[in-house]
Image (tube, rainbow, N blue to C red):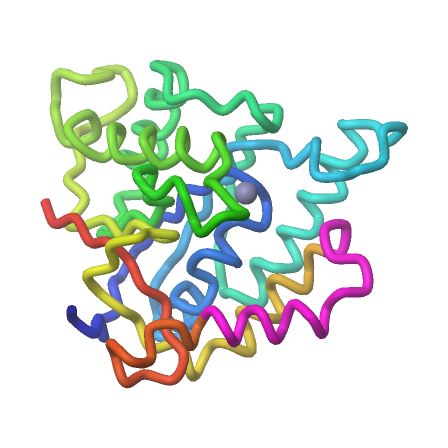
Amino acid sequence: MEILSEIPNRALAIYAHPDDADVSCGGTLALWSAGGCEIHLVVCAGGDKGSSDPLLDADTLMGVREREVETAQKHLGIKSVDFLRIPDGEVVNDIALRRKLVNIIRGFLPEVVISPDPTAIFFGEHYYNHRDHRETGWAALDAVSPAAFSPLYFKEEGSPHKVSYMLLSGTLAPSVFVDIARSIDRKERAISSHVSQLGDSTEWLRSIVRERAKEAFVQTGIEFSEGFRRMVF
Ligand SMILES: [Zn+2]
């Protein structure tokens, strides 16, 4: 177990749904951007099925959710966002997605990539990891290594780039923790930006965010943290 205190220069976050990055690593992103890190976010899925209203138009909801991301990104200091607009439930770790991610990695040149841990499936008795999260996690891993740094993969998508390390969120095997005491307020504000997903449950959400951030306290001695599985290349 290690406390990760260094701030990278360039970080790329690759997540499935419009609110996933905020929930998974919003504290880390807000801390890093305040420390001068340039952050780019990739949102793979449209968020077009994030409603229980059967009459809601998918394109309308996707537009609403993209605007919510634009509000959230200001709280986190995310500089730019790519929306891949894959329909919810249809994200697949296929050649097309890996090609797109390799293109983005080779264009943005991140030192670190943050994405979901696809091996984390069962969380207690009431939740198992969404398929889109798992597929996004595998696609990010496969795009970073070996594809993005091998000159023989996707030659037409730019020059090879080697990412220094990956941080995998939502993991059951965290190896590093980031102290988010100074950025948990911004994380909460970012999550609260996703109004279409929250309704009037903002207060409830705040207590959940703080409870989760306290979960590793016994291990780390840090009041609020985000834990990640780190892969170094
Ligand atoms: Zn999600």
x and y, in percent, of residue 7 in the image: 26, 69
Residue at far right of view: 55
Residue at far front of view: 125
Ligand 1 sits in quadrant? top right
x and y, in percent, of residue 24 in the image: 45, 56
Which residue appears at 44% of the width and 20% of the height? 92
Q: Is residue 75 above or below residue 42?
A: below
Q: Identify which residue, 233 or 176, lies in the foreground.
A: 176
What is the quadrant of residue 15 in the picture? top left
Q: Is residue 125 above or below residue 6?
A: above
x and y, in percent, of residue 115 in the image: 36, 45
Q: Quadrant of the N terminus?
A: bottom left
- Is residue 202 shown in magenta? yes
Majority secondary structure of magenta residues: helix
x and y, in percent, of residue 52 in the image: 80, 38
The residues colored magenta run: 195-212
- Is residue 67 shown in magenta? no
Left or right: where 22 falls relative to 199: left
Q: Quadrant of the C terminus?
A: top left
Which residue appears at 85% of the width and 35% of the height? 53
Left or right: where 131 falls relative to 196: left
